[in-house]
Image (cartoon, rainbow, N blue to C red):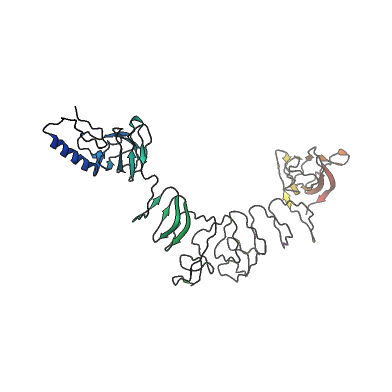
Amino acid sequence: MASTYVNNLRLNEMATGDESGNWGVVTNLNLELAGEALGYGTEAITTNADTHTSTVADGASDPVRAMYVKYTGTLDSACTITIAPNTMKRVQFIENGTSGSQNIIISQGSGANITIPPGDTKVVYLDGAGSGAAVVDAFASLSVVDLKVQDDLTVTDDLIVNGDIDLEGAIDVNGTSNLDVVDIDGAVDMASTLTVAGVVDITDTTDSSDATGDTGALRTEGGASIAKKLYVGTDLDVDGTANLDVVDVDGAVDMASTLTVAGVVDITDTTDSSDATGDTGALRTEGGASIAKKLYVGTDLDVDGTANLDVTDIDSTLNVAGVVTAQVSANISQVAITSSSNATAWDAAAAANAYYVTSENTTISAPSNAVEGAIISIEIAQGGTARTVAWNTVFEFAASTAPTVTATASKTDIFAFRYNGSVWQEIGRSQNMAQT
């Protein structure tokens, strides 16, 4: 009978009567290969290969027989490594020592496989199930009594700790750390967000290293108690409500949303040399100017109560839903309009009090931006040469007859109209007045 190699280390199993006179040589080789299986081996992958097969040799030295196998070589994509034969059952440490920052995928048959990132080592076992053989992560659920890590501990999934964590150095958690109790003797350096679903309960006693000596105080990096002062070196982002008794802001307040004050904004600062106006107790704009001098509002200014203003300068439209009461007088500034190609355009909103100096024979066009109930007027002043002026049919005059504009140089006519929703009705005129 011939020798067989069906065991998990591919050792020579001699049949009865085999290797006559050579039994000692074969036995010694088997012992050497058994020792090799307890050792360390390396195997190179062909440069940039996508697949690789590691076959443990029958009865001969082979690096993949080792308990710890390191794969080397340069890859430009992930490489699937098949360990053969697919009937071999064993545990192995496998290291991805390749360059190129690519994963290696350990497989034995059509069953599950294990991915090992570059630079990482995993403990796997081969189930040897033949064509459907699977490779399993032996430490997928590892239970130990004491685990000591002398360098970095990287957790890529949840870290669940049922007891206390006594942390003397740094801990870097990329995912979620679900901890019942955390006891930290040193500093906590947060590169991302710290979310506390419950309460931060501070129960420490007076610590001589605390600059303020406060008992049970949440302290800043410099040791100052938050009960006295909280210093934030960069941004302080509060998604919910910040309930503060007193807010002292030395720099700028940049509001991305709405600032709602339920009480009173009380300004009690003294004269500040950095304030361009030097006003005492003034609410200032970004440029330093006191609001007592100028307030610029980029969008809407909504005042539900009374706005007591000494002077109001409005560059655009003033929309008043109620009554406008002027205790002294209301003045509508006059606006010049001009003609082109024998037509005079008139914007009823922008030039409610218009004047036009003739430069050609023209027709007063239908006013734009007409609003029912609006009142507008126009002064028509003849230049050095008298011109004729006609009217668009949207203007309605007494007896439906348009007036003849005074055709005398240096004479002025004034007409006033009210819009009824469809036509501009004349409500007054003064003609043939001397220009002064």
Seen from the viewer's position, the closer of residues 137 and 293 is 137
Seen from the viewer's position, the closer of residues 10 and 435 is 10
The spot of residue 328 in percent (x, y) is 79, 61
Magenta residues: mostly which secondary structure? loop
Quarter of the image where one finds residue 92: top left
Query: What residue occupies the far left of the structure in this picture?
Result: 21
Residue 143 lies, with reference to residue 272, above or below; the image says above
Left or right placement of residue 228 versus residue 46 in this view: right
Residue 133 lies, with reference to residue 213, above or below; the image says above
- As for residue 74 lying within the magenta part, the answer is no
The spot of residue 342 in percent (x, y) is 72, 38
Quick check: can you spot residue 341? yes
Left or right placement of residue 110 versus residue 322 in this view: left
Seen from the viewer's position, the closer of residues 421 and 212 is 212
Left or right placement of residue 326 versus residue 228 in this view: right
- As for residue 298 lying within the magenta part, the answer is yes
Query: What residue occupies the far right of the structure in this picture?
Result: 399
Seen from the viewer's position, the closer of residues 221 and 110 is 110
Q: Quadrant of the N terminus?
A: top left
Please name the residue shown 58% across and 63% down the image: 288
Query: What residue occupies the far top of the structure in this picture?
Result: 1
Magenta span of residues? 293-315
The spot of residue 72 in percent (x, y) is 27, 41
Q: Quadrant of the C terminus?
A: bottom right
Please name the residue shown 38% across and 33% down the image: 111
Left or right placement of residue 233 versus residue 347 in this view: left
